[in-house]
Image: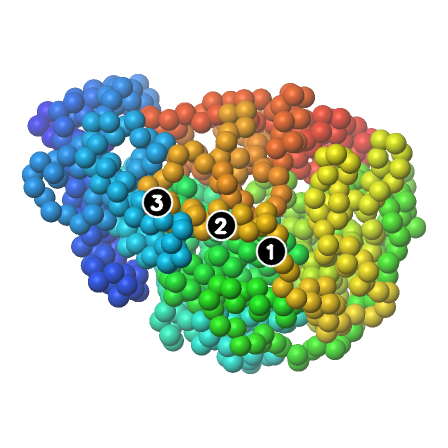
Amino acid sequence: MIDNQTILAKPHGVPLEDHVSNLLEETKKMLAAREFVVRKYRERTRDDLGEAVREGVRWHDEGKKHSKWQSACRLDYEEYMRAKERDPNAKVRGRHLRQVGMRHELWSLELMRAQGVKTALPVRVAVAAHHSKLGHKHRKRWKDFEIFWAEFAREGSAFRTSDPESFERALEHRYKFAGPRSLLQLVDHRASASEEREELPEFKSFNYSFPYSTRRGVQRVIEELWDEPFAILRAPTGAGKTDAALLWAQHQIKDRQIADRLVIAMPTRFTANALSISTAENLSAIGLYHSSAWYQRIKGKASVRQREQCLIDKEQVLARKLETPVTVTTIDHLCICLTGTREDHHATFFNLAHSCVVIDEADFYDDFTQQNIVTLLRALRTLEVPVLLMSATVPESVRDVYSKSGFIISKIFEDKSDYERVRCVVKKHCKAEKPEQIADLLQRALNGEPTIIYANTVRRAQAYYRWFVQQFGKRGEPEKCEDLVIYHSRFTEPHKVDKEAKLVEMLGSDAWAYKDDKRPCGIAILTQIGEISVNISADLMISDMCPLDRLAQRAGRLSRFDKRGDDKRNAIGELFIIEPLATKKTGEPVSYPAPYGTYDKGKREWLPAEAFSKSIELLFDGEYSAKTFVVRVNQLYPSARKIEPLVRINQRALEDCIVLNWLILPAEQVEKINGVEPDDDHTKDWKSRDIPPQVTVYAIQELVESGEFNQYFPNKSKFREFQLRHGLQCYVYEFNHAVEAQIVELMTFQIGEESQEQVFVLRPEFYNSKMGLLIDKELSSKDDEDIITSSSPGII
């Protein structure tokens, strides 16, 4: 037991003196590993970052000395010790602290004032924000501390959206304040985890080893551009762009010393898996946020217990904040951190400022995305962050678009070493709604030819999967379903790991090289998630029509590998194009361009985006090389398009967030839907792309069945792990249908001792590891089980 004279920091008995000492030790480790950060901070602000963090550590919990807080903490500690006598695994409940009615960090500010301590404003802000309460949402907590709120509010409102210089000035000020603010939270979380005897990931440095004896094409071209502040690189799929990007990053970090980490930003969260596992092994450390590649890399390399601990865990949290030496994430994630609408955005922003950034395969058909990238580039230029944009088919017109960021773009650098070789033969096959309408083409896959099928939507992908299962059942070949894999965005992260492993086993480079007696086999049914993320190949591909730059990505999975056990070199793949249809209630067939368009509620049908319609016109039957795709994409986007009013309004909303939210978190930015906050890709006025907002639902069946389900989480970090592992996104209109149809049910989770979160969890029959999320009541896994098990026992 702790004696009555000891000042406590935590209800599980950690003395405040020890806690502060632990934070100082973590600060020492952090600063030693972040020499570049300390140097850049001094160069930009003329302040000592280490001293600011140490001062924040000294005062952050000083308010816990208040007698009222200590009395409540000691009662919780005594209750905890009694509970441990009954159960060694007992958790701190903290009910007295929940009822104490005071915020210790605000009392810390009061003690600093009362003692006449002259600390810099960024330090006081760091103390005030270290529990994420410096925001309008928590305004009522400040009623007895108006003097501090007024000071922070006055500072935070220093800039006006009408002032053209406010954008850059707000970014500069935010950088100065975000340093002590985010790093105090980092060392506080690490010290607290250490005190609870949790294992901590080490601070690691970027280190890359080029895995080949010589550099080829694009890896030589990279040397021509790597001193540019912003460069655009065009190179065919399969040309080695990943290693070229890593060479570029190594130059920025080791040679130029203008960054200390690499961020690779992909078009969407479901394609944020660009680094193959073999490439990742040549890196010191890698964090992937919104991706399953990180899980894939550790799978099989740790014990079951370690795997469970590491699966999402603290490295995933570090990746979210761009704290890992290499982080693969999304363009949306970088844009949302600029908005400053959540506390962790300040950490992500600060770490972004010390990165070099690779933007890989931006969606050129999406004006929302393009203009968000322009604003992102404008911010990166202000923060002096080097940027490389890579694409197989980047159009010349983007030079005009991205020049609005202030970067000077002299040319598009290009690898033409394998430019004119024929890659594939394209054939416009037909217009179709259902798989049975192209049964003649699918017959080749049924007969055993390795095949990749791209569907534009999850619903269409699931329709293909059902059709193949039924056909294998009719043929008396249910065992072939084992090599039938559907992969889309609506699987949980652990199941994505399994999907990718199976796909690579079936159609990866080892299978095509006939390594270890393997042979390519099976049918891969993919959505956009497979355009970039999965390193597989087939000589036969069937794809829904899509914009030509996306089609070029899909075609990059055709005859992809040079080393083949069948001795075929430079094989030419076959690509059959299906123009998707849908049937109206009147029975009339109409074009179905989703998601490449907008939904007209009046007509109750999808209207194609210009890039989709024009791609149909530009696509021709015949042979395609990398050059052919580039020429056609340049024709698709011949010039910078006029910015539509809706797009410009959205871009201004992002700019306004940057100017207004640089210090104090705004009030609730996103309206909750049925009590649930939508996914973190938009604010009240800004969104990352022109699609309906999405809501997260949770698949917990496996947790329930294993007896691991628990509605209590000791802290937000643990709850975030649960969210990342078990969360699935669906559109709001689908979610509303799911609520009405009782596909989901509301559950309340306790987060630590202070807060609760309400989330919607799926009923078990509406998610399974084979099909993923089945949001329609009439398409539950019960129905699929009837379909599948009748022909293939044990598949579900």
- Say which of marks 2 and 3 sits in front: 2
Identify the amino acid type marked 3: Glu
Residue 248 visible somewhere in the drawing: no
Residue at mark 2 to residue at mark 3: CA–CA distance: 43 Å
Residue 369 in the image: state x and y as whole percent: 58, 53
Residue at mark 2 to residue at mark 1: CA–CA distance: 12 Å
Q: Which residue is mark 1?
A: 643
Q: Which residue is mark 2?
A: 652
Q: Which residue is mark 3?
A: 199
Alpha-carbon neighbours of circle 3 within 10 Å: few (<14), some, or many (≥20)?
Answer: few
Q: Earlier in the sequence, mark 3 or mark 1?
A: 3
Residue depicted at x 87% and y 40%: 589
Q: Earlier in the sequence, mark 2 or mark 3?
A: 3
**Which residue reaches farthest front?**
162
Residue 591 in the image: state x and y as whole percent: 82, 45
Label 1: which secondary element:
loop
Give left or right: position of 23 versus 531. left
Identify the amino acid type marked 1: Ile
Residue 609 in the image: state x and y as whole percent: 72, 51
| Quarter the N terminus occupies | top left
- Say which of marks 3 and 1 sits in front: 1
Q: Classify residue 777 by image quadrant.
A: top right
Q: Classify residue 768 by image quadrant.
A: top right
Give left or right: position of 748 versus 769. left
Pick the front one: 524 or 99: 99
| Quarter the C terminus occupies | top right
Give left or right: position of 783 versus 290. right
